[in-house]
C-alpha cells in the first residue's frame, strides 16, 4: 500500500531566512521522510509585530532565493498573499485543501512552542497535524514539553532518530520533540550585523545576502 504524502509546514517570519532554518528543515525532512517541506513566511504575524520588519514581499523573495536548488523544500505565499494577520489555524485549512490525503507535519522551534497556548484556537491547531518541535539555541526542549501539562502527555514523545520517530508515529504520538544539530544562528543577530555594517557571509545563502543589500533591509534601528 502506498503511504500518504508527508508534507512539512515550516512557518515563521523568516526575517531573514538563514542557514539554521535550512539545516533544521533538511534534517527533519530526512528523518521523517517528508516528501516536501513548505516554508510559509507570515504576512503580519500576531506574536512578532515590531518596527523594522522587512516587507512580506522581501521576506518571501529571500525564502525563494534560499530554497533554489534544494530538492524537497519549497516556498509558499499562502500567508504573504493575505491582507491581514496570519493565523496557523487558517493556513493549515488551506494546506489541507491543497493536499487532502496528506499527513501534515508542523515544524517549529522549542522557543515558538513555548507560546503555543497564545495561538488562536491552539487546541484545534494541535489536532490538525503532527507537531515537530526542534532544538533551538537558548530554548529548552524540556520546558517545551512541560508547557501543555498532563492532558497532552499521551500525545507527546521525545525522539532520537528516524526509527524512533516512526515507532512513535505508529503509536499515535502527534507531538514529537527532536534534538537536532541546531546551528547557533538567529535572525535577530543577522539583522544586528547588517545594521552594524558587518559581514553575514556563511550565515545566510548568497542570494539572501544580495537581497538584503539591494533592498537596503535592516538599515534602521530596531525597536
Image (cartoon, rainbow, N blue to C red):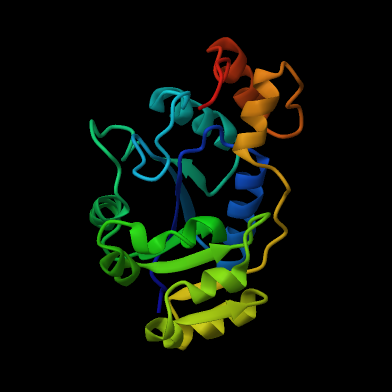
Give the vertical position of 169 relative to 83 (above or below).
Answer: below
On the picture, is 200 further left or further right than 53? right
Q: Position of residue 130 (x, y in %)?
A: 41, 70
Residue sitting at 29 percent across and 50 percent down?
91
Q: Position of residue 29 (x, y in %)?
A: 57, 59
Answer yes or no: is residue 172 visible. Answer: no
On the picture, is 187 further left or further right than 59? right
Most foreground residue, 85 or 81: 85
Q: Position of residue 64 (x, y in %)?
A: 50, 32
Quarter of the image where one finds residue 101: bottom left
Q: Position of residue 183 (x, y in %)?
A: 72, 49
Most foreground residue, 59 or 220: 220
On the picture, is 135 further left or further right than 220? right
In the rendered view of the protein, which quadrant contains the N terminus?
A: bottom left
Give the vertical position of 118 relative to 173 (above or below).
Answer: above
Residue sitting at 62 percent across and 59 percent down?
139
Residue sitting at 56 percent across and 19 percent down?
221
Give the vertical position of 145 relative to 72 (above or below).
Answer: below
Quarter of the image where one finds residue 81: top left
Amino acid at each position: 500500500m502506498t503511504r500518504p504524502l508527508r508534507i512539512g509546514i515550516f512557518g515563521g517570519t523568516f526575517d531573514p531566512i538563514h542557514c539554521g532554518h535550512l539545516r533544521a528543515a533538511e534534517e527533519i525532512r530526512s528523518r521523517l521522510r517528508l516528501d516536501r517541506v513548505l516554508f510559509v513566511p507570515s504576512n503580519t504575524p500576531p506574536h512578532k509585530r515590531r518596527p523594522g520588519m522587512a516587507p512580506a514581499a522581501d521576506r518571501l523573495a529571500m525564502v525563494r532565493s534560499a530554497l533554489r536548488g534544494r530538492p524537497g523544500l519549497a516556498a509558499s505565499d499562502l500567508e504573504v498573499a493575505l491582507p491581514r494577520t496570519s493565523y496557523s489555524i487558517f493556513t493549515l485549512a488551506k494546506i489541507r485543501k491543497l493536499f487532502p490525503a496528506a499527513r501534515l507535519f508542523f515544524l517549529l522551534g522549542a522557543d515558538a512552542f513555548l507560546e503555543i497556548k497564545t495561538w488562536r484556537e491552539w487546541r484545534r491547531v494541535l489536532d490538525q497535524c503532527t507537531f515537530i518541535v526542534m532544538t533551538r539555541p537558548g530554548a529548552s526542549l524540556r520546558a517545551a514539553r512541560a508547557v501543555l501539562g498532563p492532558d497532552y502527555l499521551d500525545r507527546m514523545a521525545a525522539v532520537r532518530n528516524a526509527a524512533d520517530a516512526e515507532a512513535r508515529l505508529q503509536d499515535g504520538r502527534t507531538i514529537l520533540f527532536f534534538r537536532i544539530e541546531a546551528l547557533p544562528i538567529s535572525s535577530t543577530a543577522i539583522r544586528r550585523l547588517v545594521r552594524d555594517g558587518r559581514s553575514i557571509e556563511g550565515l545566510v545563502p548568497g542570494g539572501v545576502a544580495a537581497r538584503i543589500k539591494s533592498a537596503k533591509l535592516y538599515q534602521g534601528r530596531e525597536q
